[in-house]
Image: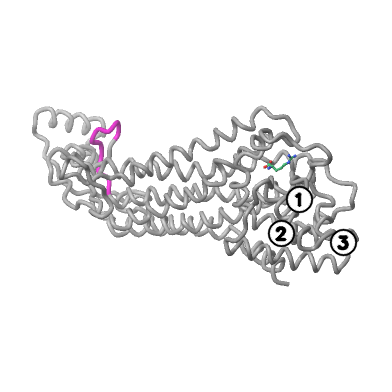
Amino acid sequence: MASKLWEKSVQVNHDVETYTVGRDREMDLYLAKYDVLGSLAHIKMLESIGLLTADELSALTAELRKIHSEIEAGKFVIEEGIEDVHSQVELMLTRRLGDIGKKIHSGRSRNDQVLVDLRLFIRSEIEDIVHHITLLFKTLNEQSMRYRNVLMPGYTHLQVAMPSSFGLWFGAYAEALVDDLTVLKAAYEVTDRNPLGSAAGYGSSFPLNRTMTTRLLGFHSLDYNVVYAQMGRGKTERIVANAIANVAATISKLAFDACMFNSQNFGFIKLADEFTTGSSIMPHKKNPDVFELTRAKCNKLQALPFEISLITGNLPSGYFRDLQLVKESFLPAFDELKHIIDMVNAMMAQVKVNEHILDDSRYDLMFSVEEVNRLTREGMPFRDAYKKVGLDIEAGKFSPVKAVDHTHEGSIGNPCNEEIARLYRSVLESFDFETYHKAFSSLLNE
Ligand code: ARG
């Protein structure tokens, strides 16, 4: 028996099959439950335009729901010799329902099937990521409030520059996540459009009701033009990968700061012992390996949009098998990012800060601008005050008052954590996950 949907009289060469299937049987498991949801919507629509009877629809619906629960229970496999998830589901339906199973593919192609699977997968993964980012945001925002008054040196060129605070340090990374979330929202909007019905990339002579499948799958709108719908393959992944890369860049910078500030030469923060790792030769070592791996993993994630660009960049319009390879690095990226965020969240929640950094005189000069500003407030022109303090420093006569009085928005004395939290909430509330949850629940239960 032919094991491929498309095999007719000639059997394909075994090596060619191995080469072209590649890692699809493993990758498509990420998409399996979305493939079934896409089919549930597709058959409902086929029935509405007379391509399936009501009885056929209910038999197929019941069987697809059964397959969906098998997937949820971890019991679904793509069998040896079966090309991909789309073939496996159709095969299961045909085994269980005979000819009715063979009717499901009218008016679609695996090209729009995988397109819609990816969109549904990405939507729900973005929802997860948003949840994880929100937990990290809360931790950083709280730590900023807790350590609002603990001063630390700020650096430019890695040279001691001006007073900063742990309130500002933690709060900066919290605010970075507001922007990262904003970009993620844009990526979500691009994803939340229905490509189903574009078939092989040129539509179908069946009078498909694409508005209906759009509603059934809880999409906000559709990719109207069928050629553009197919052009979305690779493009959507690249846009989403860029959004992931922003989060990764934020966390990578945080990880570097944390490694550096944890070093004895800084001694600004201390990681709990159980969050550090030892050395096989040096008995005293407590290494920040978690942050080091975080940095490298985040840097890898930042390579993802480039990898996708290179795989897809020289393709004209229309489907190509090249697109299949995008799945291999794209699909696992979400679990990787979630894992990273969870570890960083745990680390940042327990990190201890040094409240006595400024007792060390090596940081005295960071108060030079405070002194210039004090003289300026007393009436001396800024340039004269600057010069006087500079000459005092050179003559060894500068002794700082280690207090700061910064009041403007976003400064040491006024870090605006509530405002930043409000900004975060407004982006968070702009996501609509409810519509697709309701749609999925109808497809699976009603
Ligand atoms: N595994 C394929 C992919 O991910 C599914 C689509 C196959 N379509 C085709 N025309 N060969 O792209």
- Looking at the image, residue 89 sits to the left or right of residue 148; the answer is right
Is the stretch drawn in magenta largely helix, strand or loop?
strand
- Residue pointed to by mark 3: 52
Q: Secondary structure at mark 3?
A: loop
What residue type is disc 3 on?
A: Leu
Crowding near the residue tagged with mark 1, few <14, some 14–19, many ≥20 C-alpha atoms within 10 Å: many
Q: CA distance from mark 3 to mark 1?
A: 18 Å
Q: From the top left corner, tell me how far across and down residue 129 is, in percent.
A: 51, 54
- Looking at the image, residue 386 sits to the left or right of residue 397; the answer is right
Q: Nearer the viewer, mark 2 or mark 3?
A: 3
Tell me if residue 253 comes above or below residue 426 in the rendering. Answer: above
Dot 2 or dot 1: first in sequence order is 1
Find out whether the residues at labels 3 and 1 contact each other: C-beta distance under 8 Å: no
The residue furthest front is 1
Please identify the quadrant where the C terminus is shown: bottom right
Instruction: Report the residue at 47% width, 45% height from top.
Output: 247
Q: From the top left corner, tell me how far across and down residue 41 is, in percent.
A: 76, 60
Q: Is residue 163 magenta?
A: yes
Find out whether the residues at labels 2 and 3 contact each other: C-beta distance under 8 Å: no
Find out whether the residues at labels 2 and 1 contact each other: C-beta distance under 8 Å: yes
Ligand 1 lies in quarter: top right
What residue type is disc 1 on?
A: Leu
Q: Which residues are magenta?
A: 156-165
Tell me if residue 390 comes above or below residue 119 in the rendering. Answer: above
- Residue pointed to by mark 2: 217
- Looking at the image, residue 424 sits to the left or right of residue 357; the answer is right
Q: Is residue 260 magenta?
A: no
